[in-house]
């Protein structure tokens, strides 16, 4: 399947741009901060030749740019904290570009008392030429009538539901085409339901697991099969007793 | 099953009062092609005393670690848990990963999802990875004063004690302390939020060989976990 996808990409002219990205979430009382650093380069031969500059582009759930930021690190052991702008949608991802920063960057969710943190991922964003883009849009729209998508990329992921806790899924469309994401949930082999969500180019969707999972008297593991018509990735969002209105955590997956 | 299996030893910590589930295979596929050949779990007291050891069913999805530890008579409030996996590298092109999910029962904080630290093995020769993995770092944002930070350290070695140096940075001030861990022993090293007028900015963990390490954040009032994550190896 991987070789077939690679061949299809070449034939269609799909480009992949190396990209470092991090997810973000904002809620009332919850601040999201990106921590730019270059600490993993501190022993490198050019580590003393600062400053190190980075540009950060914050994209909203609909894929549009919310704001652009710049960060400057005087030395390789300095850090720069960028507090992201809250939006109505409250979710998305940021793309960080820098010629000389090569360190995992952190993203933190903080309330008045504490913060949780995870790191970003160095992957790629897919760029589609016009014809494949239109073709994907048409085929995707047709398949959507049957609650299907073109399953060019798939992921399997466990999520968790308990009486006062759960994990949701932040799905990020890492392509400049509309990405229809189909989520199939099951527990112990028994189907729980299917959802189809449409993500705009470079858009994000916070997938609330509650309607599929229902109530659980003890913390239980559910299985998700996630399919998309273009490249996507996900982070898990941990929630406590106040669910999406209380403290949250973000965590990367492989 | 292949007659040439690869090995991976991963480790985590469990504390009483938490729901704690560990995925045997992170991102297990629907058809269960991604499965381990075997997986053994072992539980140790802080001084390294073995408390429990068992082979798990590698076809199961997740281990209820809280339930397993609760069934151990006299288990201390925190234990060190190792997972010894055997796998076919044709099935796992890089290596398998175990991920964990934990939440304090009746707690107010968010649940946490984390990657179980791979401590021994799991790096195939063909990758040619020569990076050292026994020197790790972690950066901190300013703490609000209602939060505690620490590192949890566990020695996965069977026979050798581990000397671990924990170095904290507060602006230009640098503090170092050394802990010695007997085989399979573990400890939690507190990281004060402030020192000599500076705030905690960074921690480094150095050991003579790879140890299991986690960065830990707790709410000061309840000591409930708000952060449980891996550190970062330094080389790029």
Image: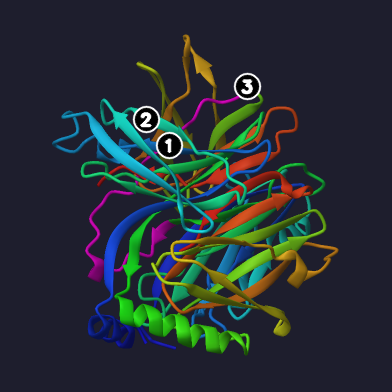
Asked whether A177 or A173 is in front, the reply is A177
Q: In whole angstroms, how far apart are the C-alphas of marks 2 and 3?
A: 20 Å
The segment highlighted magenta reads B119-144
Q: Is residue B39 left or right of residue B218?
A: left
Q: Residue at x 36, y 76 (%)?
A: B93
Whether label 2 touches label 1, CB < 8 Å = yes
Residue B220 is covered by the magenta coloring = no
Q: In whole angstroms, how far apart are the C-alphas of marks 2 and 1?
A: 7 Å
Q: Position of residue A98 (x, y in %)?
A: 26, 44
Quarter of the image holding residue B89? bottom left
Q: In the rendered image, which quarter contains the N terminus of chain B?
A: bottom left
Q: In whole angstroms, how far apart are the C-alphas of marks 1 and 3?
A: 19 Å
Q: Position of residue A155 (x, y in %)?
A: 50, 75
Q: Which residue is mark 3?
A: B145
Q: Secondary structure at mark 3?
A: loop
Q: Is residue A81 left or right of residue A88?
A: left
Residue B136 is covered by the magenta coloring = yes
Q: Residue furthest top?
A: B196
Q: Which residue is mark 1?
A: A35
Q: Chain of mark 2?
A: A
Quarter of the image holding residue A247? top right
Q: Which residue is mark 2?
A: A79
């Amino acid at each position: 399947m991987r070789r077939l996808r690679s061949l299809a990409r070449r034939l269609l002219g799909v480009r992949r741009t190396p990209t470092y990205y991090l997810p973000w979430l904002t809620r009332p009382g919850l601040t999201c901060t990106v921590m730019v650093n270059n600490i993993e380069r501190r022993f490198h031969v050019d580590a003393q030749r600062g400053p190190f500059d980075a540009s950060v582009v914050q994209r909203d759930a609909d894929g549009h740019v919310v704001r652009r930021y710049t960060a400057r690190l005087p030395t390789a052991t300095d850090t720069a904290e960028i507090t992201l702008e809250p939006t109505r949608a409250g979710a998305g991802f940021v793309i960080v570009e820098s010629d000389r920063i090569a360190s995992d960057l952190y993203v933190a969710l903080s309330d008045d008392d504490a913060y949780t943190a995870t790191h970003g991922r160095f992957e790629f964003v897919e760029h589609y030429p016009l014809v494949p883009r239109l073709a994907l849009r048409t085929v995707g729209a047709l398949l959507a009538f049957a609650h299907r998508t073109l399953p060019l990329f798939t992921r399997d992921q466990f999520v968790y539901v308990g009486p006062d806790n759960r994990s949701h899924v932040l799905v990020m469309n890492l392509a400049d085409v509309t990405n229809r994401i189909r989520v199939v949930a099951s527990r112990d082999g028994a189907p729980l339901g299917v959802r189809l969500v449409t993500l705009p180019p470079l858009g994000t969707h916070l997938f609330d697991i509650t309607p599929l999972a229902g109530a659980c008297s003890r913390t239980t593991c559910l299985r998700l099969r996630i399919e998309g018509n273009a490249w996507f990735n996900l982070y898990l969002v941990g929630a406590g007793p106040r669910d999406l209105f209380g403290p949250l955590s973000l965590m990367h997956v492989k | 099953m292949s007659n040439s299996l690869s090995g991976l030893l991963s480790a985590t910590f469990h504390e009483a009062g938490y729901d704690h589930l560990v995925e045997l295979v992170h991102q297990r596929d629907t058809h269960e092609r991604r499965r381990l050949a075997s997986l053994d779990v072992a539980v140790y007291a802080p001084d390294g005393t073995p408390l429990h050891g068992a082979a798990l069913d590698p076809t199961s999805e997740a281990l209820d670690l809280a339930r397993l530890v609760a069934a151990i008579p006299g288990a201390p409030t925190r234990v060190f848990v190792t997972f010894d996996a055997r796998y076919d590298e044709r099935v796992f092109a890089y290596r398998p990963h175990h991920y964990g999910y934990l939440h304090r029962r009746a707690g107010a904080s968010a649940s946490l999802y984390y990657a179980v630290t791979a401590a021994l093995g799991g790096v195939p020769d063909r990758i040619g990875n020569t990076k050292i993995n026994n020197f790790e770092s972690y950066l901190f944002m300013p703490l609000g004063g209602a939060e505690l930070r620490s590192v949890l350290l566990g020695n996965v070695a069977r026979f050798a004690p581990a000397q671990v140096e924990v170095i904290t940075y507060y602006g230009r001030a640098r503090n170092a302390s050394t802990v010695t861990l007997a085989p399979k022993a573990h400890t939690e090293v507190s990281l004060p939020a402030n020192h000599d007028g500076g705030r905690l900015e960074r921690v480094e963990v150095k050991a003579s060989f790879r140890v299991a390490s986690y960065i830990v954040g707790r709410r000061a009032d309840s000591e409930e976990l708000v952060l449980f994550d891996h550190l970062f190896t330094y080389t790029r």
